[in-house]
Amino acid sequence: MDPSNKATPLTIPGAKGIAGSSGMGQPMSSSYENQWMLGDDKKHERRKSSTVDSNKENKDASSQPNASVQPPARKSQKSMTKAERRALQEQQKLEKERRVAAGLPKNAKKAAELLAKTGGGSSVKSGSPLSVAGTPDNTTASVGKSVTSPDPAAAAKKAAKKSAGATSTAKSQKNQVPWLLHLDASKRPDTMGFKDLHPAVKTLALYFSEYKIVGSNARCVAMLQTFSKVIEEHKPPADATFSRHIQKHLDPHIAYLLATRPMSLSMRECIRWLKKEMADIVEEDPPLSDEDARHRLMNRIEHFIRERITMADQLIVQNGLQKINDGEVILTFGKSSVVESLLLATKKKGINFKVIVVDSRPLFEGKHLLRRLAAAGIDCSYHLLSSVYVALSSVTKVIMGAHALLNNGAVYSRTGTSMVAMAASDKQIPVMICCETYKFVNRTQVDSFVMNEIGNPDDLVNTKPMFNSIHQNHPNPTGSALENWREQPNLRILNLMYDVTPSKFITLVVTEVGLIPCTSAPVIWREYNEEFGKRG
Amino acid sequence: MLTRQVESSVENFISRLKRRQVVGSYEVAKETAVILRQVVSTSRWRDVDTLLETITDVGSRMAAAQPKELAVGNIVRRVLKVIREVARGELETDVLDDSGNNFSDNSDDAGDDDEFDSDDGVFHVEGATPSSTGSPLRTPIHARPTLLSSNASSNMGSVSGNDLNALATQSTMFHLLADAHKLKDSPTEYNVYNLKPLIIQEINEEIIAELESVYKGIADQASDYIHANEVIMTIGKSRTVEDFLIRAAKTRKFQVIVAETSPTYQGHEMAANLSAAGIETIVMVDSAIFAAMPRVNKVVLGAHAVLANGGLVAVTGSHLIAAAAKHHSTPVLVCTALYKLSPLFAYDVDTFNITVAPNSIMDFQDGAIIDKVTLCNPYYDYVTPELVSLFVHNLGSAPPTYVYRLINDNYDPEDTTL
């Protein structure tokens, strides 16, 4: 893609008008409109690698900086009048068309995700600032303002290119790693279908997609609290009782969250638990009143959060404290909230120990952990994953967190955990995993591919240019060697988020019920689920 | 003993080594060879010993300038070995000289030097011998190969008689050297005049020319190691590996996964080059190496240096790849040229490691914590010999257990400590 395309914004008046007038309900057809109206010659400008993959269009995404900030400003749909709601919907439709024409994904969240993620990286190229606009009304105007070099032909060409690519999901898989085609890199949620989403859920989805809330516990807690709010404010239609309707009401919200970022395994467990609770309420005899059902559900959620997450963390810290002694050197990977609490508690207890934080791209979560630990006065050092063997020369224990614990005792956690565990076990260093019991899932996978999450491949492209020595030749300051990776038909980028650590590398799992070997995971799971059965 | 001009260029090189302005085995090796050739040609020496001393002196200074750049020491040792051999060849023809066939014998021996020196991996050479003589010598004995070559065939008769004698005397090298010293007196001046051009020619052909042909030698073996529809994993940016894979891609269709090698991100360039050459490439974070390993059929690595025990000094992250490959029983090939072979041992995993500036892992924007934490940014990694399956070098291939023999072929034991 030549630079001119990147700077061009999305003023495609023809397409917009046409798209606006045709069947607005189906996003697909509007992009067909673009394709048809703009002529066939534009179509074969379409590069092989033009894909529907949402993250490709970061270049023109930055020229439309304002689409992203729309959600926070949206008023709650319940408080708007009907006319206002209609105006809002029209506005959203227009924006969606604009986005589609520009090649952004239809979902505002995804567009925001693109902009947020790639605004920094491609800011040099695009030149248009990632300005902050207030209301949706400003969006149109500021898009107009951000037109730096309106080039209708190029824009139209691009639109044809992108929208043609947008039509078929098959194309999205061109730039995807072939053996990971079964994983969804990016779905295209139909916002039009979700008419009555609670704005809190939309906000949450936005946070997820921008990686503002990361980490298993954080996401679960945020999700449960959001659902609690939804339940609180939900008014069932006149013909249904609360208890029967709440499940149906929550389903589209769950689907929406799934669409923005695939659910973590622990989140699925929570949702499974929540659905069970809701089903239990329905079966209550005599049937509960609406208010009672609502309160009960909210109480249950609160109870779950408190008991199985918050207090579980405290118990894990207590259990783990007995394992850290004076003079130890602890190595940890990434950022786990439980491990952080454990290390801080250990410091508070007065034990003299050192911490080595190992970090990896592209999220660099370890830096946040490092900050907190350094602030608490712990003696820390910081390594990247590639130098973990150098770090391991002085380590006595490795403590890591987990995203989920599988039925065969394997740990499903951030990519890189398996490497640290492998390296440590090769050196006979014990590996401890801190994991709450709600993360125990009733499924197994034997390799890291059958179920995983693929992150944004463009996260890997942007590397910081480095100037320090000849040893580290920095790529040219404007971009990295992989800038135009999508144009290379043979080049793919893989940003795997999770991996599976085989149980043979793990010495011990610290849970709130005690210190267990990782192969006992299914036993614990059954205990808890039987308990639910009894309770329900 | 060095001329001023050569001395200044040596100083220049040393200071650039110290400041890390010249970096990378290939560059360093080339410059070292050129400088040593200058030393040989411009310095004044009347006998071989003086020359050896001079070279050792210059060489140890250069090697000390940057001890982790093992290529410097390797080339110095090579040159020393070349000198000794040429001198031995010279002297022995004097010893055997009956009929005054000096010139032909000299050329013979010079030719023999070529054959001998380039037949290091004579066991494993499948076909490609970059040796200029091209004689198919496959003697398993490590003695000087028989002189009944095409060169010798031209000089029949008396020469063959000489050859057999030569073979007998050469089989004990050290004795020869000891004897040669005593015999040096009379033909001293004569030797110097002859030796100098010979040595320079040797250095040119042997060392400098070999440096050029290294990539070709390794790439030629590429299709022997890669089959169709393979998935190969590699890390870092190594021109050797790149040439290897691109050559293989001409005859085989396979995929390559490149680990991006943080914090230098050399993997990105490698991937860009490979995909531009038409190979299906996937770039991946280092942390996904273990996750992706079940999918991989072979791992191909480049090396910064190969140590005497078969261990490897390579870019950081290589140990991770090699260990993950071991866990999945995936073979690990290391593409390395012979000039990277060093007779030194690593008594500690970090002996040959260097750390570079940490701002690539945490820059000043994270300023608040910089004072409170220790940052470590090592550039190299040490890979134990147990993790490597095979070294592919420009004269063939060798398992890690054979490396010590290659070292014997290329270097003299007395040069190990310069």
Image (tube, coloured by chain):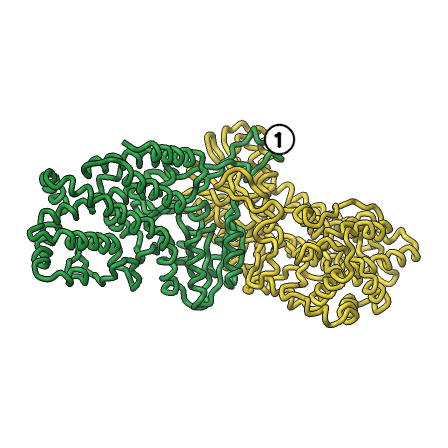
Chain colours: A yellow, B green
Quadrant showing the C terminus of chain A:
bottom right
Frontmost residue, B384 versus B236: B236
Mark 1 neighbour density, 10 Å: few (under 14) some (14–19) many (20 or more):
few
Name the kind of residue labelled 1 in the image: Ala
What residue is at 37 percent from the left and 45 percent from the top?
B30
What residue is at 39 percent from the left and 43 percent from the top?
B28
Numbered label tally: 1
Q: In the image, residue A180 lies at what x, y percent?
A: 57, 62
Task: Locate residue A472 relative to residue A64 in the image: left or right.
Answer: left
Frontmost residue, B149 versus B126: B149
Q: In the image, residue A262 lies at what x, y percent?
A: 65, 57
What residue is at 35 percent from the left and 47 percent from the top?
B340
Can residue A325 be seen in the rendering of this structure? Answer: yes
Q: In the image, residue A37 lies at what x, y percent?
A: 79, 70
Task: Locate residue A190 relative to residue A353 in the image: left or right.
Answer: right
Task: Please determine whether, in this image, residue B197 is positioned above or below residue A455.
Answer: above
Frontmost residue, B48 versus A151: B48
Residue that mark 1 sits on? B368
Q: In the image, residue A355 lies at what x, y percent?
A: 51, 35
Q: Quadrant of residue B33?
A: top left
